[in-house]
Image (tube, rainbow, N blue to C red):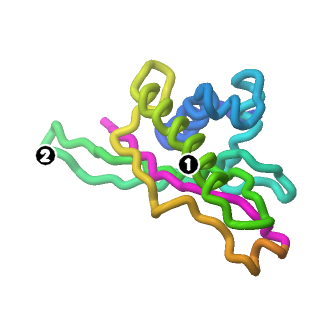
Amino acid sequence: MPNVTPTDALSLAASTLRLTIADSATFRTWTNSANQAAALAKIFSGSAPAGTTAPFAVIEGPVDRWARDGGGARERWVGTAELVVRFRGSAPTEADSWDARFEFLNKVGAIARELRALFGRVGYFDADAWEALSPGPVRPTRTERVTAVGDYYELAFRAVTALVEQ
């Protein structure tokens, strides 16, 4: 758990996205987390620690983009915070399996649906956009699977929220 309280728009965006994911019932079930605190322990910043067992999520960013809006005395900065969420689940190493692929997509699809239902509610991430970054899921090459990388499925999403400074 972080020891620093998020207070700026960028840290609040990352924090509320993390809390929103932790409140997904499907994410909790998938990660075998009994409650929000246990689910938060399965959501990492930037990358997962070496040896972390899937399933889990990683939040990268945010990247902030700002532009001037208006002019004169009413001029203000408006922007967006863009974060990337990567969901990683285990995959069977013995063979490529449509069943395993569909099982992963079913889980991540259900999580994404639950997140979209929570976005914008008080205390949750207020998404203006949510999109997959690539066709998925991504899986390491056969050579990578037998090395330290291991075998997994991963699907990444871009989450965007508005930022306003007066």
Q: Which mark is residue 71?
A: 2
The magenta stretch spans which residues?
148-166
Seen from the viewer's position, the closer of residues 75 and 102 is 102
On the rendered image, what quadrant is the N terminus found in? Answer: top right
Which residue is painted at 68% across and 66% down in the image?
Answer: 96
Give the class, few, some or many, for how many residues have Cα within 10 Å of label 2's Cα (few <14, many ≥20): few
Q: Is residue 78 left or right of residue 53?
A: left
Please, is residue 23 above or below residue 161 in the view? above
Give the crowd class for mark 1: few <14, some 14-19, many >=20 residues within 10 Å: some
Please tell me whether residue 47 is drawn above or below residue 76 in the rendered image.
below
Residue 144 vertical placement versus 56 (above, below): below
Q: Name the secondary structure under disc 1.
A: helix
Q: Quadrant of the C terminus?
A: top left
Residue at the extreme bottom of the image, as rendered: 143
Where is mark 1, residue-wise?
A: 105
Q: Which residue sits at x=61%, y=25%? A: 25
Residue 23 in the magenta stretch? The answer is: no
Residue 90 in percent (x, y) is at 74, 53
Q: Is residue 155 magenta?
A: yes
- Kindly report the distance in space between the C-alpha atoms of the residues bearing marks 1 and 2: 47 Å
Q: Nearer the viewer, mark 1 or mark 2?
A: 1
- What's the amino acid at mark 2? Gly
Nearest the viewer among 105 and 20 is 105
Q: Look at label 1 and name its amino acid.
A: Leu
Depicted 91 relative to depicted 166: above or below: below
Q: Is residue 163 visible?
A: no
